[in-house]
Amino acid sequence: MNQSNNDNINALKINNLDKVELDVSALDSIDEGLISRYYSADRLLPIMAATLKYIDRRIENGLMLPYFTDISLETWQHKIKALDIYITDKIEGRELNLEARGKDYATNILSYPSDLPVAIIDLMPTLPLGELIICHEVVVREAAEQDKSVAQHISHLLVHGMLHLLGFDHELGQAEQEEMEGFEIEILASLNLPNPYLPNA
């Protein structure tokens, strides 16, 4: 990570980290050192904060969040956003992907939106975004195939997964894919990370 990237993340820590809450858990067989190295709050919270900061700016310009259309702007702006992340292996990842999407293989990330009624969210101290399930073995394999670092790939997948939790879906059509990828590229650029859709990015 270069100095400019460190400066960006430090600025995000000062400005936005009081607005986000992150809980990371893992399958018992996942090594704690791996969690500390790749999935610590210090690594992931700045990415989460950058994503939400970008989305907030887009909301100010009229963007609607498909899964949060019933939430008032005041509620969205003032509640702490909470995210759960669960790290798993290929065996459990395959089972979860088959159950969730009918696909019999382990995928890199699964997104489970919170889908809570507004009346419940209004009573909660935080606004739960949902849960992301990451299969670390798949992430490592994909990072090697794409000639990028594991940390860089995780950064992209976290942004990608959070956008899914907000209701954006690249599988709905070409326009939706281009919109979502555009968001990802701009969010990662704010962290001085390259366009993940370019070769060797």
Image (cartoon, helix red, strand yellow):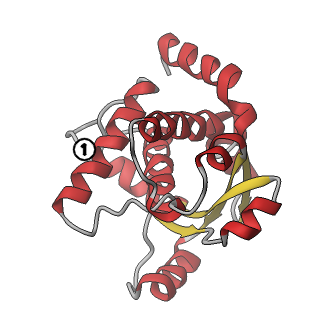
Quarter location, residue 170: bottom left
Which percent across, then down, holds residue 63? 39, 46
Residue drawn at (41%, 23%), measured in percent from left and top? 192
Secondary structure of the residue carrying numbered label 1:
loop
Compared to residue 127, the image places residue 17 above or below, namely above
| Quadrant of res 43 | top right
Q: Is residue 4 above or below residue 27?
A: above
Regarding residue 198, the answer to whether it shows in the image is yes
User: Viewer-proximal residue, 61 or 139?
Assistant: 61
Residue 199: x and y, percent? 20, 40
* Residue kind at label 1, given as amino acid type: Tyr
Residue 84 x, y percent position in the rendering: 68, 59
At horizontal 56% and vertical 63% (from top left) the residue drawn is 70
Determine the image quadrant of residue 113: bottom right
For label 1, count other residues whose C-alpha is less than 10 Å away and answer few (under 14), some (14-19) or many (20+). few
- Judge left or right: residue 178 versus residue 160: left
**On the rendered structure, is 179 left or right of 4?**
left
Image point (42%, 38%), residue name: 58
Query: What residue did someone put label 1 on?
Result: 197
- The outermost residue toward the left is 174
Q: Looking at the figure, which quarter contains the C terminus?
A: top left
The front one of 42 and 172 is: 172
